[in-house]
């Protein structure tokens, strides 16, 4: 599956597991992010082109890092007048890994919780196992209560 998304005033062609560098987006590394502006989706032989957006389509991704681009040097001068000005700029960028392309209004799947150190995914923690078994009923206190319970 392939999609064209729009973010930061630019368009990007993306597929699952692609890593793209886009204009700065809010989010810490590891945070999930969703691109709602999907312009086109290609799924095998079926191509859906939006007018201007594809209804119900979104692209899910994960922020890998916040970084800065290469320095762009700006130099201005006027000949014979000894006028020179130099400046530089580094654009803030976000590196995003595309995790899934969703169509039909589907939502991205929640991340699975990682197992704690020394624990495997198949093991059930002791607290959950203890709460899963029903508690024994309290024993009747007197002989009359015992007789009433048996009837």
Image (cartoon, helix red, strand yellow):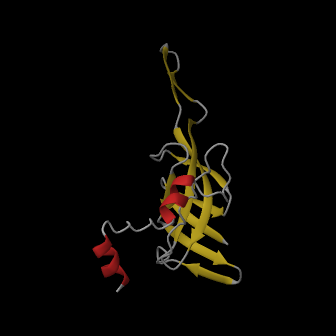
Tally of numbered tags: 0
At a point 53% along the width and 20% down the height, the residue shown is: 79
The image position of residue 71, as x and y in percent, is 58, 30
Q: Does 51 sit above or below residue 35?
A: below
Give the image quarter of residue 137.
bottom left
The spot of residue 104 in percent (x, y) is: 51, 80
Q: Quadrant of residue 138?
A: bottom left
Percent from the top left, x then y, of residue 24?
A: 49, 44
Q: Is residue 107 left or right of residue 139?
A: right
> Farthest residue in the right direction?
44
Q: Seen from this angle, which residue lies furthest bottom?
A: 151
Picture layout, residue 7 above or below residue 56: above
In the rendered image, the residue lying farthest to the top is 82
Seen at 67% across and 44% down, the residue is: 118
Q: Quadrant of the C terminus?
A: bottom left
Q: Is residue 42 above or below residue 78?
A: below
Query: What residue sits 50% from the left and 65% below the top?
Result: 132
Specify the quadrant of the image occupied by residue 73.
top right
Residue 97 shown left or right of residue 79 in the figure: right
In the picture, measured across the screen, residue 119 lies left or right of residue 78, that is right
**Residue 64 at x, y = what percent?**
59, 45
Looking at the picture, tell me which residue is in the foreground, 73 or 91: 91
Q: Quadrant of the N terminus?
A: bottom right
Which of 100 and 148 lies nearest the eye of the viewer? 148
């Amino acid at each position: 599956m392939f999609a064209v998304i729009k973010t930061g005033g630019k368009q990007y062609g993306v597929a699952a597991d692609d890593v793209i560098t886009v204009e700065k987006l809010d989010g810490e590394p590891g945070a999930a992010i969703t691109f709602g502006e999907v312009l086109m989706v290609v799924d095998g032989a079926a191509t859906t082109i939006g007018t201007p957006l594809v209804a119900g389509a979104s692209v899910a991704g994960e922020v890998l890092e916040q970084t800065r681009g290469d320095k762009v040097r700006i130099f201005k001068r006027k000949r014979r007048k000894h006028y020179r000005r130099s400046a530089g700029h580094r654009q803030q960028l976000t590196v995003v890994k595309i995790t899934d392309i969703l169509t039909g209004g589907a939502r991205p799947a929640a991340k699975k919780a990682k197992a704690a150190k020394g624990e495997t995914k198949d093991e059930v923690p002791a607290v959950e196992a203890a709460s899963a078994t029903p508690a024994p009923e309290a024993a009747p206190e007197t002989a009359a209560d015992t007789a009433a319970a048996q009837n």
